[in-house]
Image: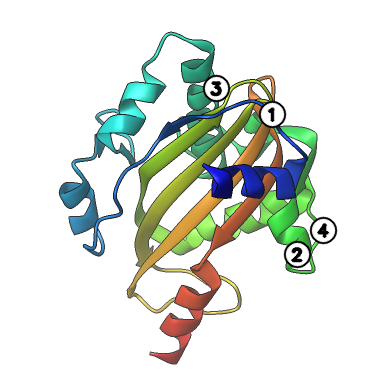
């Protein structure tokens, strides 16, 4: 757990509270085959979110930890435009996205709204596979390891539609204020994968 505590401390500050950790071995399969190989199942019948068995157990807990995990699911639905939710419904007005700031962009709600709008319109038949979720209940922090993808049908990061499949990994760290995300730090290979599509 030392690596996890370092990541949280680097983004948010020193934490003394131990996490509730649920780890899954990362499957080697690519694309939707990865969902099957991980044993993941859809969150609901119509959902594009698939969850590994251990993550589902956490989400379904009737505990403060489970409630925080469900806040994160609500956040994911909002940024992907699912379940009738939008970015504005699931983040605080003063949200700060450290990953966007590190990329030289404003890390505010306007940039997050614009980025997610372009991503949502650029990916068709998308999915998200939640492979690991770690919850720090005291400070209301959730860390998630996610694998996602779909068909690249619109411009994203300056790359026009290719019609090919785009798959990427995200490790995201999120601080919640109530049921809304207030601070985020994403580490992802999305830029690399989009650039690979451009060169193909």
Q: Which residue is mark 4?
A: 106
Residue drawn 39% across the image and 79% down it? 162
Residue picked out by circle 2: 102
- Is 75 or 183 nearer to us in this picture? 183
**In 3D space, how far apart are the residues under numbered discs 2 and 1 (Cα atoms)?**
26 Å
Per the image, the residue denoted by label 3 is: 68
- Lower sequence index among marks 2 and 1: 1
Q: CA distance from mark 2 to mark 3?
A: 27 Å
| Classed neighbour count for the residue bearing mark 1: other residues with Cα under 10 Å, few (<14), some (14–19), many (≥20) | few
Callout 4 crowding tier (Cα within 10 Å): few <14, some 14–19, many ≥20: some
Q: Position of residue 50 (x, y in %)?
A: 31, 40
Q: Is residue 28 above or below residue 2?
A: below
Horizontal side, residue 144 vs residue 102: left or right: left
Instruction: Measure the alpha-carbon separation of dots 2 and 4.
Output: 9 Å
Q: Residue furthest front?
A: 2
Secondary structure of the residue carrying tag 2 is helix
Residue 16 is marked as: 1
- The mark nearer the N terminus, 2 or 3, is 3
Mark 2 or mark 1, which is nearer to you?
1
Quadrant location of the C terminus in the rendered image: bottom left
């Amino acid at each position: 757990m030392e690596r996890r505590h370092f990541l949280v401390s680097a983004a948010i500050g020193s934490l003394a509270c131990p996490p509730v950790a649920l780890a899954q071995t990362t499957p080697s399969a690519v694309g939707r085959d990865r969902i099957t190989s991980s044993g993941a199942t859809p969150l609901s019948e119509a959902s594009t979110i698939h969850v590994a068995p251990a993550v589902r157990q956490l989400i379904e807990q009737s505990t403060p930890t489970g409630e925080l995990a469900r806040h994160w699911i609500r956040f994911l639905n909002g940024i992907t435009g699912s379940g009738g939710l939008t970015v504005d419904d699931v983040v605080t007005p003063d949200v700060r996205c450290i990953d966007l700031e590190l990329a030289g962009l404003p890390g505010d709600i306007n940039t997050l709204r614009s980025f997610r709008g372009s991503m949502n319109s650029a990916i068709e038949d998308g999915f998200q596979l939640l492979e690991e979720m770690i919850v720090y209940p005291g400070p209301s922090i959730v860390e998630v390891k996610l694998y996602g993808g779909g068909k690249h049908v619109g411009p994203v990061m300056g790359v026009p539609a290719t019609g090919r499949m785009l798959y990427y990994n995200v490790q995201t760290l999120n601080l919640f204020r109530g049921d809304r995300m207030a601070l985020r730090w994403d580490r992802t290979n999305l830029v690399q994968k989009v650039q690979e599509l451009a060169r193909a």
